[in-house]
Image (cartoon, rainbow, N blue to C red):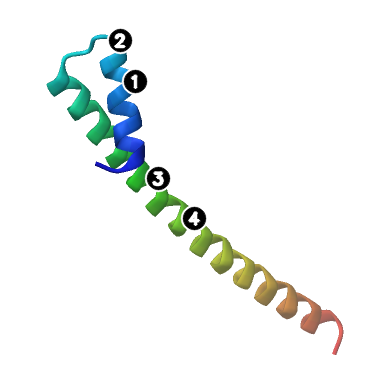
Amino acid sequence: MTTMQSEVYEAFRSIDVPEDKAVKAAAALSKRDDDVGTLKSDMNLLKWMMGFVLAFQIGIFVKLFIH
């Protein structure tokens, strides 16, 4: 178990959640954290792509009126 999973597991066990359910909950939260990390990296890529497209469009707009 990772540190995050063990902390979640210990928190659930401290409130008398059965062990099997505490393990499943800790694993589910860990999976969710992995999914969030993937989404964050995808969002960073999309931000860079949108920035490039915006800069390209501004360049075309400027080129149309200032030659």
Q: Are there few (<14), some (14-19), or many (20+) residues within 10 Å of tag 4? A: few
Dot label at residue 15: 2
* Circles 1 and 2 in contact, beta carbons < 8 Å: yes
4 or 3: tag closer to the N-terminus = 3
Q: Residue at x 21, y 22 (%)?
A: 22
Cα separation between marks 2 and 4: 37 Å
- Nearer to us of marks 2 and 4 is 2
Q: Is residue 57 left or right of residue 43?
A: right
- Nearer to us of marks 1 and 4 is 1
Q: Residue at x 26, y 17 (%)?
A: 13
- Mark 3, residue position: 36
Q: Are there few (<14), some (14-19), or many (20+) residues within 10 Å of tag 3? A: few
- Mark 4, residue position: 43
3 or 1: tag closer to the N-terminus = 1
| Of the pair 12 and 37, the residue shown nearer to us | 12
1 or 4: tag closer to the N-terminus = 1
